[in-house]
């Protein structure tokens, strides 16, 4: 044993050498912070299911954006909560809709911040589904025009990027063609290309008031038993003009993230969703784990699997932990 030539522990002896040989590196430039914007004024309401997260109205949103900028997080993703809902989700594309108001406020106050919007109908429809209905079924093709119209309204209000999350077939192409036709050919699309029907969305649905009023979303979101299907979905979105692909959720689908990244060669985003965040928060509050350590380890696992971009409710904290050297 005295003649051991290979000793991997040589490269683990202290923080300096561990940092030099680190395989997966995380930077603040790869983080996106999701924010909920509720129609109204003077709103900064805590979200019980997402400890530490808030609903903001467009006039109070700058407080949150200032914190994001101070943390060094370069981008946010906005989710709208309208005052009125109807079967067609008409407030999704209204010129003075809640996201459109928020975009104009953010663009004027924080020109350096990169603004991304979620494009879906579930927060805006009275039935809570991600598309228009025909009877009790979501009408895929009729929904495409509405999604494209919504995306266009976001870009016209100041969005730098749009992110369709509805999982309708053909929605990336519909949005791409609409943006191009209206002079926004340079606006990228971040596609929720691989979005599973997941139990991990529970806290988000409470936060956004977007739970379906009947049935479920398994008819358009993916079956979590399938991984080859994820590659097919991703390749279709690439053909249709997606610029970045997303896998959602993140932690339970690291294998899928790795496979889609290998198969497509595209920039990859992953969404560490509300249930993942809430589990770490609850376990830390119960004294079962160290919150910072668990959040950092989870984030690194997502990048290690192939993500280039992480959407996380921990984005501000992760930026701080990067500065502290706990992650990086």
Image: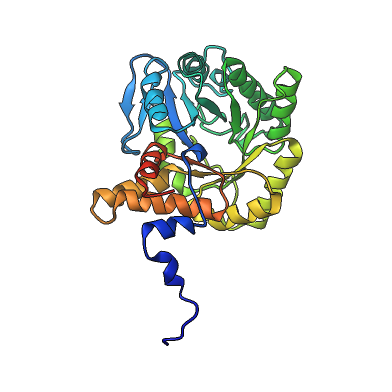
Question: Residue 71 occupies which quadrant of the picture?
Answer: top left
Q: In this rendering, does residue 124 appear at all?
A: no
Q: Is residue 57 above or below residue 205?
A: above
x 34%, y 44%: residue: 324
Q: Residue furthest left?
A: 287
Question: Residue 170 occupies which quadrant of the picture?
Answer: top right
Q: Position of residue 147 (x, y in %)?
A: 64, 27
User: Which quarter of the rendering shows the N terminus?
Assistant: bottom left
In terms of depth relative to the viewer, which is nearer, 131 or 236? 236
Q: Position of residue 210 (x, y in %)?
A: 47, 33
Q: Position of residue 87 (x, y in %)?
A: 56, 24
In terms of depth relative to the viewer, which is nearer, 101 or 6? 6
Q: Is residue 277 above or below residue 259?
A: above
Q: Is residue 73 above or below residue 281?
A: above
Q: In this rendering, does residue 36 appear at all?
A: yes
- Whether residue 225 sits left or right of residue 290 in the image: it is right
Q: How is the image coloured?
A: rainbow
């Amino acid at each position: 044993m005295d003649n051991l030539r290979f000793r991997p522990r040589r490269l683990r002896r202290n923080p300096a050498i561990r940092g030099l040989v680190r395989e997966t590196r995380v930077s603040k430039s790869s983080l996106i912070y999701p924010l909920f914007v509720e129609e109204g004024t003077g709103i900064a309401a805590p979200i019980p299911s997402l400890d530490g997260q808030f609903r903001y109205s467009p006039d109070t949103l700058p407080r949150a954006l200032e914190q994001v900028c101070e943390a060094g997080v370069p981008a946010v993703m906005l989710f709208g909560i309208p005052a009125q809902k109807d079967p067609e989700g008409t407030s999704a594309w209204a010129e003075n809709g809640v996201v459109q108001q928020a975009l104009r406020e953010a663009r004027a106050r924080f020109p350096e911040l990169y603004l991304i919007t979620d494009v879906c109908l579930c927060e805006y429809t009275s039935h809570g589904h991600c598309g228009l209905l025909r009877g009790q079924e979501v009408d895929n093709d009729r929904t495409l025009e509405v999604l494209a119209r919504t995306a266009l309204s976001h870009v016209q209000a100041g969005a730098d990027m749009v992110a369709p999350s509805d999982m309708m077939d053909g929605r990336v192409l519909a949005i791409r063609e609409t943006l191009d036709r209206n002079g926004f050919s340079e606006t990228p699309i971040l596609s929720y290309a691989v979005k599973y029907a997941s139990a991990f969305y529970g806290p988000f649905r409470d936060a956004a008031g977007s739970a379906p009023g009947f049935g479920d979303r398994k008819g358009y979101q993916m079956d979590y038993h399938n991984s080859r299907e994820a590659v097919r979905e991703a390749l279709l979105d690439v053909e249709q003009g997606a610029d970045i692909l997303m896998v959602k959720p993140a932690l339970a689908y690291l294998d899928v993230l790795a496979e889609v990244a290998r198969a497509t060669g595209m920039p990859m985003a992953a969404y560490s969703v509300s249930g993942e965040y809430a589990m770490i928060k609850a376990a830390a509050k119960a004294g079962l784990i160290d919150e910072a350590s668990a959040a950092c380890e989870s984030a690194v696992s997502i990048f290690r699997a192939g993500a280039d971009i992480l959407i996380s409710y921990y984005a501000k904290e992760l930026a701080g932990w990067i500065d502290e050297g706990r992650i990086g």
